[in-house]
Amino acid sequence: MDANLWNKFDPYTYIQDNYATIHNEDREIIHRLLKFYASVGKMKLAVDVGTGPNLYPIMLLIPYVQKVYCVEYSTKNIHYLRDQLRSLDKNWYTFWDLIKSGSPEHQIDLLKHLKKKLIIKKGSIYDLESDTYDIASMFFCAESITDSYEQFRKACLRFMQSVMKNGYLVAAFMENSKGYEMKDIRFPAFPVDVSLIEKVFAPYTKNLKIEHIPVAKQPLRAGYTGMILLTAQRI
């Protein structure tokens, strides 16, 4: 990974472009994962890899785990996440209201639980510890850090290997993403679809469920054809 490129990543611009409001694709992911996490129940140790400035995957996890390691590569994103532990931006409470409305487990003090459970750690997906976590989540990371299939596959393998045997995996991908530009800086992407995700994950998982979420009438941005949600267990 190019440290110089990712240290130019502006989390505040990214938030404004992607998470200032709740887009329909994210709304659909939230509804589906609330059901999944309720079916899994309580766990001890989680990791969210490539978090960026996106807090809603951790918000979904937070009542079900004792600790969440947030592994993030970009220094600016790490500063953003640490700032959020002091005082959450208002947009995240909009996400939290949606999550709470669909889950009795989430009737808790969000900021208090984030401060208690979240451990922010600088690191790369390629350097994740193996056989460590009960559950791992990865949202829009592996396909958004490279334009190489081999690097994408390597990132997914490290993600899968980070959980213990029978550990749970949750991932979301931008389908056929062409990358994105922010402040005249081009960030890479590797185009993925459901069949490719199945090819990469099926040999190493069980209870694999891959769902396609179509682009909403008002797309998040140009240059993608939908989102893909994956849940599975490592074999």
Image (cartoon, rainbow, N blue to C red):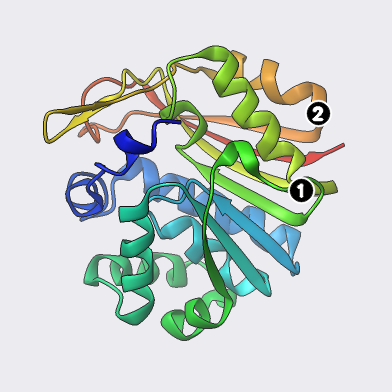
Dot 2 amino acid type: Tyr
Residue at 45% in and 47% down: 73
**103 over 58 or under it: above or below:** below
**225 over 116 or under it: above or below:** above
* Residue 195, image quadrant: top right
Dot 1 amino acid type: Val
Give the residue at the far front of this rendering: 4
Question: What x and y, as percent, mark residue 120?
Answer: 50, 65
Question: What x and y, as percent, mark residue 2?
Answer: 39, 31
Q: Secondary structure at mark 2?
A: helix
Confirm whether residue 53 shows in the render.
no
Task: Specify few, some or many for label 1: CA neighbours under 10 Å numbering under 14, 14-19, or 20 or more.
Answer: many
| Left or right: 217 as drawn, with respect to 101 | left
Where does label 2 land, which residue?
204
Looking at the image, tell me whether mark 1 or mark 2 is earlier in sequence order.
1
**Viewer-proximal residue, 32 or 172?**
172
Where does label 1 land, which residue?
163
Question: What x and y, as percent, mark residue 108?
Answer: 51, 84
**Viewer-proximal residue, 201 or 80?**
80
Quarter of the C terminus within the rendering:
top right
**195 over 122 or under it: above or below:** above
- Asked if labels 2 and 1 touch by Cβ distance under 8 angstroms, the answer is no
